Structure formats: structure tokens, C-alpha cells
Image (cartoon, rainbow, N blue to C red):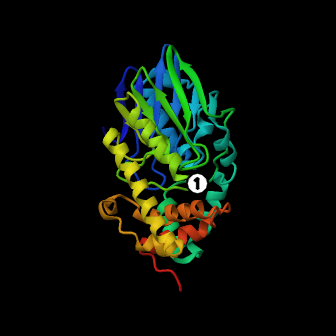
Amino acid sequence: MTEGINNLGNGTWAWLAHSNSWGWSNAGLITDGEESLLVDTLYDLQLTDQMLRKMRAAEPLARQIDTLVNTHANGDHCHGNELVRGAEIIASTASAAEMTELPPEAMAAIVASAAEMGPVGQYFLACFGQFKFDGIVHTPPTRTFDGQLDIKVGDKPVQLLEVGPAHTRGDVLVHSPVDRTVFTGDILFIEGTPIMWQGPVANWIKACRLIEEMDVEHIVPGHGPITDKEGVRQVRQYLEYVRDQARQRYDAGLDAFEAARDIELSEYASWSDPERIAVNVDSLYREFSGEQNATDIFELFARMATLAGYELPR
């Protein structure tokens, strides 16, 4: 499979980004009869418009999208919603609420001021400076659900399975049994480091096991190339490894950032964005301690910037 539109057969398509790093997300299209369902939009309007044009050229039923499913609240999976005009937009209730907390205009403001923020700003620009957040109109879901929602695209049954909170508060899998295909959103990062903004980690591990048990041929992750059951297992094993390593250091009295710096990533060090270990350990520490308040997002980016080699003032 290559960058751009990929035909999975039977009227189902995957859109693959050229990178698996920050903001470069995948999407999907399921069609049957006269109906179409889009899985996720992209981080800005230019990227989403390019994707929709390519989908329409490849699949006539993409000219009018009937249903759009946002797999979760991160902007690289929903900022382009306004371009899917006339579609019913579905997300989990938890995702819909979370989408309001970091709208596009907030990202635009942070990017605009990042140059004045020193090394952490440099890191933030390296992650997000290539995206255009100005002028995006936040376009929320028009329908929400909890748990599971069974819908149809033409005669195809499609299952929307809420598996969050995990990566975010309301992660959803989009499973098309007839196509033996599942679009996982950011439950799967392939060849890239998962980032656990929310947790608990047990939910994420359970979601991986659910995918491993599915009768599917095509597994389309939120980031990275299309994968198979072995790719799912690798993500699960990363989460289990970091959980166990973090627990040892929590019990030994290290703070979260000390623990993140101390954990040997071994075979996972080659995955993109390994510095996300800082966020993952912080989330695990909150889980271990029962702390309800999330760590300040700029503090987390400062930790990742340090691990990525950006020199922060002491």
C-alpha cells in the first residue's frame, strides 16, 4: 500500500498519509449501493480537500458523503469536518465533548506564538508548524452514541465500537465485517510510538485484543501503514512493556519524568517519536496514584522536547 488512496476491494478504500508522525493521519471510505461513509477527516482544510478530491476521482459514491465517523477528538481526525457538507457526523459522546477543548483556533494561536516559547516552541513547530489551522470552522458531530452503534452503508452492516477512554476519552473502532476491514483510529500507531493522553492502559490493551480477535484482512491504523495482527500485537506489547516498566519505577519512588528518561526502549526505540514515552509514563503514574487532574499540556511538551534533544533552560 502506498501514500494516498488505496483500494481495499468491494467498495472500501484507505487513505494513507506520507508519514506516521505528528498530525499525519489516515482515513477511510466504505461504500455500498448508493451510500458512502467516510472514516475521519484530516488536520487542516487543504489536506482534507486533497483527500476528498482523490476519493471522488477513485469512487463516484464519494462525491456525496452520507455519513462521517470521527474515531476520536484529536484535530488530525476531525478538523476537516466542515468540508463534508450534508453528511451526518457521528462520534462517541465522550469524543464530542472533548473536541471542544482544543479547537482549531486554539492550535492556530499556539503555533503563532510558538517562536517566542524557546526550545519547547521549536519542538511544537517541528510537530505542527506545517499544518494550517487558520480559518477552520469547528464542525462538531450531529449524532453521538455510547458503547456500540450498528449502522448500514447500503446493505453493508458497519459496527461502531467505543473502546475508549484509551488514547483519548472516546476512541471508536469502525468495523465493516463484510469487507473484513477495521479502521482503528489512534488505537493503532504502526511503526510509530503510541501516545496515551487519557488511559487507562487496560482499556487500550483490551482494544488491541479485540482487534486481534476480529475476522479481518485489512487493519487500517490511525497513523502508519496498513497492518496485520502482528502489528496489533506489537502495539499491545509496547503498552504492556511501558506499563510494567513504569510501575517498577513508580514503586521505587522515581517521579514520572525520571522514569520516562530511565526506561530502556530497546526494540521500540526505532519507532518514530519515541519521546512520547514522557506522556505515556505520566498518564500511567496518574493511573497508579489515582490522580484525577491531567498534567499541564505545555509541561508534557517540554518533557518530550527534552527527550527529543531540544535544550531547555534549567
Quick one: 168 or 233, which is closer to the camera? 233
| Camera sees residue 43 | no
Report the residue marked by disc 1: 198
- Asked if residue 83 lies left or right of residue 241, the reply is right
Percent position of residue 266, x then y = 31, 64
Percent position of residue 234, x then y = 35, 49
Residue shown at the point (34%, 58%) measured from the top left = 271
Quick one: 202 or 66, which is closer to the camera? 202
Residue shown at the point (67%, 45%) measured from the top left = 137
| Camera sees residue 178 | yes
Where is residue 13, by image quadrant? top left
- Asked if residue 44 lies left or right of residue 193, the reply is right
Indicate the quadrant containing the N terminus: top left, top right, bottom left or bottom right. top left
- Against 203, residue 6 (above or below) is above
Percent position of residue 278, x then y = 49, 67
| Label 1: few (<14), some (14–19) or many (≥20) C-alpha neighbours in 10 Å | many
Quick one: 237 or 247, which is closer to the camera? 247
- Asked if residue 26 lies left or right of residue 90, the reply is left
Q: How many marks?
A: 1
Percent position of residue 139, x then y = 67, 40
- Against 171, residue 133 (above or below) is below
| Three-letter residue code for mark 1 | Gln
Q: Residue furthest bottom?
A: 314
- Against 32, residue 180 (above or below) is below
Q: Residue furthest front?
A: 251
Residue shown at the point (38%, 27%) measured from the top left = 215
Quick one: 166 or 117, which is closer to the camera? 166
Q: Secondary structure at mark 1?
A: loop
